[in-house]
């Protein structure tokens, strides 16, 4: 039979596990004001860093610039080839890639939900 201290410890571990699972949220990118076929402004729903995008058919990722407001911007001289894949450093550690996160025809104000849970 378990002692009362073992029961309390087990309950605490179970609560911690429930909290950890419940704290995950799906990453969403909102296309911020000023987006166009040559400009991308991303507003992530979760704190991330080192954001880069890869255009359709490209071999490499291109770095976005972070503003003090937490938006990420890419100004291109030519129209962006969509859909765009997004690579970033998660605040919790490690890098993540979301393929085709920003679809063709993206528009300012639209939100694009990913299947990635952070």
Image: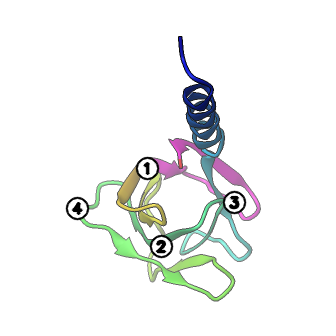
Question: Residues under labels 4 and 3: Cα distance?
Answer: 25 Å
Q: Which mark is residue 107?
A: 3
Query: Mark 1 or 4 closer to N-term?
Result: 4
Query: Mark 2 or 4 closer to N-term?
Result: 2
Residue occupying the point 68% across, 60% down: 30
Query: Mark 1 or 3 closer to N-term?
Result: 1
Q: Label 2 near label 1: C-beta < 8 Å?
A: no
Q: Label 4 near label 2: C-beta < 8 Å?
A: no
Does the magenta run of residues contain 102? Answer: yes
Q: Nearer the viewer, mark 1 or mark 2?
A: 2
Q: Classify 10 Å Cα crowding around label 3: few (below 14), some (14-19), many (20 and above).
A: some
Residue occupying the point 64% across, 41% down: 19
Q: Classify 10 Å Cα crowding around label 1: few (below 14), some (14-19), many (20 and above).
A: some
Give above or below for 97 relative to 48.
above
Of residues 2 and 102, which is closer to you in this image?
A: 2
Q: Which mark is residue 49?
A: 2
Q: Position of residue 70 (x, y in %)?
A: 64, 78
Query: Mark 3 or 2 closer to N-term?
Result: 2
For label 3, the SS is loop
For label 2, the SS is strand
Q: Is residue 51 left or right of residue 35?
A: left
Q: Which residue is mark 1?
A: 98
Q: Position of residue 5 (x, y in %)?
A: 59, 32
């Amino acid at each position: 039979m378990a002692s009362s201290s073992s029961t309390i410890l087990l309950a605490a571990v179970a609560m911690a596990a429930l909290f950890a699972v419940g704290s995950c949220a799906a990453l969403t990118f909102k296309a911020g004001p000023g987006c166009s076929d040559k400009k991308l402004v991303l507003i992530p729903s979760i704190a991330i860093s080192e954001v880069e995008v890869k255009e359709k058919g490209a071999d490499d990722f291109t770095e976005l610039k972070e503003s003090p407001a937490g938006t990420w911007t890419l100004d291109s001289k030519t129209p962006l080839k969509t859909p765009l894949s997004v690579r970033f450093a998660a605040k919790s550690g490690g890098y993540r890639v979301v393929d085709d996160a920003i679809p063709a025809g993206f528009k300012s104000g639209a939100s694009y939900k990913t299947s990635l849970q952070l």
